[in-house]
Image (cartoon, rainbow, N blue to C red):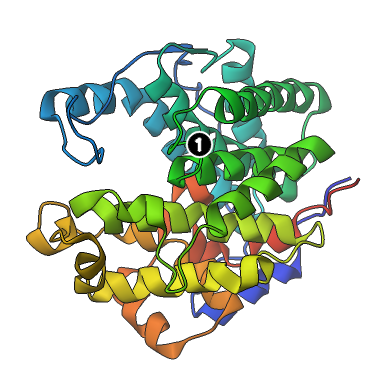
Amino acid sequence: MRVPLGIALAMTALLGAPVPLRAAETSFSCPAAPEPVVTLTFGSRYTDNSKTRSDIDEASNAEVDKALQPVEKFINALSKMANSALLDKDAAKASCVLDWLDTWAQAGALAKLETINVQLAIPARFSGLAMALLQAETTTELEPEKRTRVVAWLDQAAEATMSFFDNDAPKNASRNNLRAWAGLAVAATARLNGTPGLMDWARSTFELVTCQAADDGSLPLEMGRADRALNYQLHATAPLVVLADLLKATGYDGYAACDGKLSKIAAFSLKAVQDPLIVEAITGKVQTFTTGEQPLQPYMLAWVEPYLRHAPDPAIDAYVEPMRPLSHAKLGGNLTELGDWVALLAIPTP
């Protein structure tokens, strides 16, 4: 049995965000699921001679975006529907989330990943898919046969992710932000099916990435990304913070691990966003956020919401307030309105 949605959602008021706890007032008709994407193939976003993997190849980058677009649209729409189901206690929308995922599961979606770059990119997308199902089943009891199919599909993807990152991923990618996203995807899947091996791998991944941090909280592999170092520091911080939330129910304290380095990583990321010169001093490169090549987007700071629950800070709260709501589909969606939704999930069984 899964924990039903209840009055605990009122905890989100602690973040200062009004949460609609009403039941759905209008009927909802589940639309047809977007066409499943079974095969993906694309190259690198970076030029062939980019040793730091920071020099964008514009043509290749556009090809990657085009290939991923239908997957991104599916995840974004699915996440919004799952968020609405959870916040409005809408069983029809929760069932629709399952129906959409079942359509993709039966089609064997995202099973044919034809390049290393695809295999590196897809775990973050599976994170968003698993998060949506977790939210749906927290809203209502889902149809068992469909749920079994979807969880088996996600479980298979998690097994493939673990094998790839343990055996075939490039050396740096097997330990950097991409590994952190893989850990989040595997942990979210583990919270669905209770498989101990998955959660163990997610925990070891959390430590593998987090324990590398320097004393100031900077992540060496991300600092090696030249003018995009700050971007990738943020890209690593996001899954680590949410992963700590998912691991908490297993009795694991991610904030205590590695001598408290997760807090240092988060604090460094927030300081650097407000003063990129901190990263420039480490890398010797002016950061893209400073040059304007890459503007800071609110989704990049969605992880701040769960972090603030761990370490309340009025200054940080005031800094992100103009950017709210902070939402990132691969982290679970609108984390401002959802509040501590992870605390509503069933406790994983050994």
Q: Can you give x and y, in whole percent of width and height, for residue 95 in the image?
A: 67, 34
> Residue at 76% of width from left, 61% of height from top?
252
Displayed quadrant of residue 339: bottom right
> Residue at 25% of width from left, 41% of height from top?
52
Displayed quadrant of residue 188: top right
Q: Residue furthest bottom?
A: 314
Q: Do we see residue 13 in this rendering? A: no
Q: Can you give x and y, in whole percent of width and height, for residue 100 in the image?
A: 57, 26
| Local crowd size for mark 1, using a 10 Å CA cut-off: few (<14), some (14–19), many (≥20) | many
Which residue is more in the foreground, 305 or 55? 55
> Residue at 65% of width from left, 75% of height from top?
11
User: Which quadrant is the N terminus positioned in?
Assistant: top right
Amino acid type at circle 1 is Ser
Q: Do we see residue 52 in this rendering? A: yes
> Residue at 63% of width from left, 54% of height from top?
207
User: Which quadrant is the C terminus positioned in?
Assistant: top right
218 vs 13: above or below: above
Which residue is more in the foreground, 33 or 298? 298
176 vs 143: above or below: below
| Left or right placement of residue 139 versus residue 27 in this view | right
Which residue was labeled with disc 1? Answer: 174
| Left or right placement of residue 33 versus residue 96 in this view | left
| Left or right placement of residue 199 versus residue 292 in this view | right
Q: How many marks?
A: 1
Q: Can you give x and y, in whole percent of width and height, for residue 121 in the image?
A: 42, 31
Q: Can you give x and y, in whole percent of width and height, for residue 305 in the image?
A: 50, 69
Q: Secondary structure at mark 1?
A: loop
| Left or right placement of residue 252 versus residue 276 in this view | right
